[in-house]
Image (spheres, grey):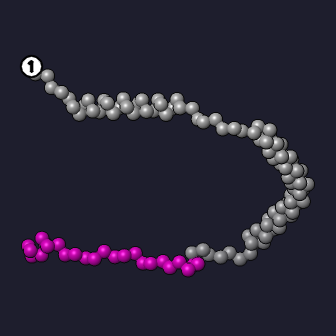
Amino acid sequence: MASTELRRKARKNRVVSKLRQDNIKRLTRKPVLKLVDIEKIKEEFAAKAASKKKTASEKVEKEPVKKAEAKAAVKEKVAEKKVVKNGPKKSTASAGVKKTAPKTKKETPDKKKEDKA
């Protein structure tokens, strides 16, 4: 029995192993370390934290005024809804929607009955 060479399978196996090796190389590669000024970064974080505290304190002072206004607005809306409920009712069906008559089926004579008659 003569042995045959499976060329396509061999090529596929080589490609698969090459891809696996490339993935391993890519995943194990270390990034280039850059010179970083740690003190400067710490100062930036401190500045951001300070600005957040200032804005948070300003928001706390403004919130009670907004809540009082919001409550008044809600009361007004509730009062308006009560007036609308007690007022005249409007029909939604006649608000520009036209009803069409149902389509009638066309009468088709049976050919078999005509041929026999």
Residue for point 47% across, 31% down:
25
| Residue 115 located left or right of residue 30 | left
Which three-letter amino acid code belongs to the residue tagged 1? Answer: Met
Q: How would you classify the magenta stretch by its main secondary structure?
A: loop
In x, y percent, where is residue 61?
91, 54
Q: Which residue is mark 1?
A: 1
Task: Provide the residue span drawn in magenta.
Answer: 94-117
Characterize the local packing of mark 1: few (<14), some (14-19) or many (20 or more) Cα atoms within 10 angstroms.
few
Residue at point 74%, 75% (across, down): 87
Confirm whether the magenta stretch covers residue 80: no
State the residue at coordinates (20%, 29%): 6
Residue 74, x across and y down, in percent = 81, 63
Nearer to the camera, 97 or 16: 16
Image quadrant holding the C terminus, namely: bottom left
Image quarter of residue 46:
top right
Q: Is residue 14 above or below residue 36?
A: above
The residue at the far front in this view is 35
